[in-house]
Image (spheres, rainbow, N blue to C red):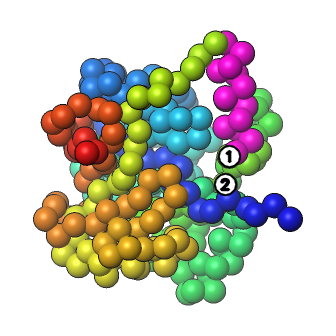
Amino acid sequence: MTTPPPAAFDHLIHWVCDLDVTVASYNDTGLATSPALTMPGFRNAAWGIDDARYVELATVDDWNAVQTSKYARGLQILRPAIDALDGDGPLTFAVNVPDIQATIDRLRAAGHDVIIDEVWFEDRQGGVTEVHVTDAPHVAPFFIAYEPPREVIAQMRADHRAANGVVFAPDRPQLVALLVGSSTPEQDAASLAELIGCGVRGSTVELTDAEIRFSADAPEGLYGISVSNVGDEPVEIAGLKIYPEP
């Protein structure tokens, strides 16, 4: 029997007011970013970390127009957090899980309330299921599963790159960690690890593909990322602090 992959970091949503300016800033920093989707009222772009993980830059130009898009329900679920952000900054992140129904059952058994959002793209014959925990701590992910599964999509992207002679540079920037400020870092790290279903080491959540580091010496909430091969000095782009990983 094949062992299913563990819960793993999938993507971070960086909410921005000016998408074009933010994309240019990412590129100037060495994080190769390009436009992705355009839907009624909504646009995004992505820094593709590898064939599976990415940082999504997202913005809404017209909330009324968004109501006709496939992302309408998902954006409505995120709307309170977007309003609370009141501008640019990291909004939330997604954790990919191999069995979304088992995750739903586990969360409900633990007493959590969840909202399930399913999006299907007929032209691609694929889609996603997102599970949002409504009573989770203020820094918590949503859970995501793809159809076809993420590892299949990643292999398709890798095959496409290979067919076009595109090779990832070995020293390209890599997302290493998400950074969270907390007055009780070890307690909050333990709670988040339990919610996700992964290990914890002190104030660090050992999430596969991007650990989550809590610190008392930082702004409250999700505030930044640690990235390797990205220079020597921290930078801030549209409310997201980017720290070089030693």
| Relative to 73, residue 19 above or below | above
Tag 1 residue: 150
Q: Residue at x 16, y 61 (%)?
A: 218
Q: CA distance from mark 2 to mark 1?
A: 7 Å
Q: Mark 2 — residue?
A: 145
Whichever of labels 2 and 1 marks the residue nearer the N terminus, that label is 2
Q: In the rendering, at what x and y percent does residue 75 appear?
A: 49, 49
Answer whether labels 2 and 1 touch (C-beta < 8 Å): yes
Residue found at the far right of this picture: 1
The secondary element bearing badge 1 is classed as helix
Residue stretch rendered in magenta on the structure: 151-164
Nearest the viewer among 174 and 47 is 174
**Residue 108, relative to residue 234: is it above or below?**
below
The amino acid at mark 1 is: Arg
In which quadrant is the N terminus drawn? bottom right
Res 243 seen here: yes
The crowding category of the residue bearing disc 1, from other C-alpha atoms within 10 Å (few below 14, some 14 to 19, many at least 20), is: many
Q: Amino acid at mark 2?
A: Ala
Residue at image point 24% right, 37% down: 238
Pick the front one: 3 or 76: 3
